[in-house]
Image (cartoon, grey):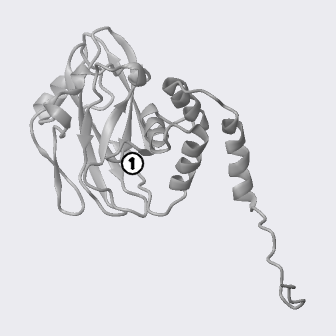
């Protein structure tokens, strides 16, 4: 059948600048051919400095370990409205700035805000970030669960840890995760100086920093001072130090 001369021919699709940027980003991944899952995870992590192995594995598994599809799915998810967000407001640790004695249990407390457009769902947690976590199969990464809070509300998250046995300056890094292990929000880096004359644990003990307590949050809920974490374990078992 002849086409009506008055009928307009649909215009060819022309990708916008965002689509073009994504196409350029995905192009190198289309030529990567490997079935080694560890290598696929490492390649996926090259898309961002804060990309962790758990998030990479999640999207690769969801895409049947197709690297290009996994990267595309990640950026599609990242661009969807309603993704959780977290802003680090303040380190409110009792005895902040004081030195710590070796092999000593202490609490760190972080004031954070839900600065996104979606509430944090039940199961959201804060956890330690470790460089060798992806290679470790015997050491669990403890989860300190946080309350479900609405947009713009704040909460104090308490995490528990054991200081290193050797004196020196250390840095520990923390991040927030969705229940399925998707990292979001600010990263929190805390420096600690370990020495025999440290006083932080004593300060926390005398001020109630190591006893069960309550941290108020704006919606009227509470979170226990010692945190809630999976399996009843403690952060002592995690290789946490950079």
Q: Please give the name of the residue rendered at 61% of the width and 41% of the height, measured from the top-left corner.
A: 68
Specify whether 7 is left or right of 186. Answer: right
From the top left corner, tell me how far across and down residue 138 is, in percent: 28, 19
Q: Nearer the viewer, residue 28 or 213?
A: 28
Above or below, comparing residue 102 to residue 152 in the picture: above
Q: Please give the name of the residue rendered at 19% of the width and 27% of the height, measured from the top-left corner.
A: 234
From the top left corner, tell me how far across and down residue 28 is, in percent: 71, 37
Above or below, comparing residue 172 to residue 16 in the picture: above
Q: Quadrant of residue 27?
A: top right
Q: Quadrant of residue 166?
A: top left
From the top left corner, tell me how far across and down residue 82 is, in percent: 44, 62
Above or below, comparing residue 166 to residue 111 in the picture: above
Q: Residue furthest right?
A: 5
Q: Looking at the rendering, in which quadrant would you find the N terminus?
A: bottom right
Q: Please give the name of the residue rendered at 27% of the width and 19% of the height, measured from the top-left corner.
A: 163
Q: Secondary structure at mark 1?
A: strand
Q: Quadrant of residue 10?
A: bottom right
Q: What residue did someone put label 1 on?
A: 89
- Mark yes or no: residue 92 visible: no
Q: Please give the name of the residue rendered at 52% of the width and 53% of the height, measured from the top-left corner.
A: 78
- Mark yes or no: residue 9 visible: yes
Q: Total label count?
A: 1
Specify whether 140 is left or right of 76. Answer: left
The crowd level at tag 1 (other Cα within 10 Å; few <14, some 14-19, many 20+) is some
Q: Looking at the rendering, in which quadrant would you find the C terminus?
A: top left
From the top left corner, tell me how far across and down residue 228 is, in percent: 18, 40
Q: Nearer the viewer, residue 229 or 91?
A: 229
Specify whether 43 is left or right of 119. Answer: right
């Amino acid at each position: 059948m002849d086409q009506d001369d008055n009928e307009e021919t649909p215009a060819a699709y022309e990708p916008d600048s965002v689509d073009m940027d994504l196409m350029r980003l995905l192009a190198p991944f289309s030529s990567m051919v490997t079935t080694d899952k560890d290598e696929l995870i490492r390649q996926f992590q090259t898309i961002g400095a804060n990309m962790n192995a758990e998030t990479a594995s999640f999207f690769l598994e969801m895409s049947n370990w197709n690297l290009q599809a996994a990267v595309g799915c990640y950026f599609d998810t990242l661009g969807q409205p309603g993704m959780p967000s977290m802003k680090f407001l303040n380190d409110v640790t009792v005895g902040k700035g004081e030195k710590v004695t070796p092999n000593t249990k202490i609490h760190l407390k972080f004031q954070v805000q839900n600065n996104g457009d979606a509430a944090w769902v039940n199961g959201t947690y804060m956890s330690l970030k470790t460089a060798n976590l992806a290679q470790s199969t015997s050491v669990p990464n403890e989860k300190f669960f946080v309350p479900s809070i609405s947009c713009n509300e704040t909460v104090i998250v308490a995490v528990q840890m054991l200081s290193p046995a050797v004196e020196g300056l250390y840095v520990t890094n923390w991040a927030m995760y969705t229940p399925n292990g998707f990292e979001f929000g600010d990263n929190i880096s805390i420096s600690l100086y370990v020495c025999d004359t440290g006083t932080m644990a004593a300060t926390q003990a005398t001020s109630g920093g190591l006893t069960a307590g309550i941290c108020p949050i704006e919606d009227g809920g509470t979170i226990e001072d010692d945190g809630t974490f999976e399996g009843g374990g403690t952060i002592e078992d995690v290789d946490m130090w950079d």
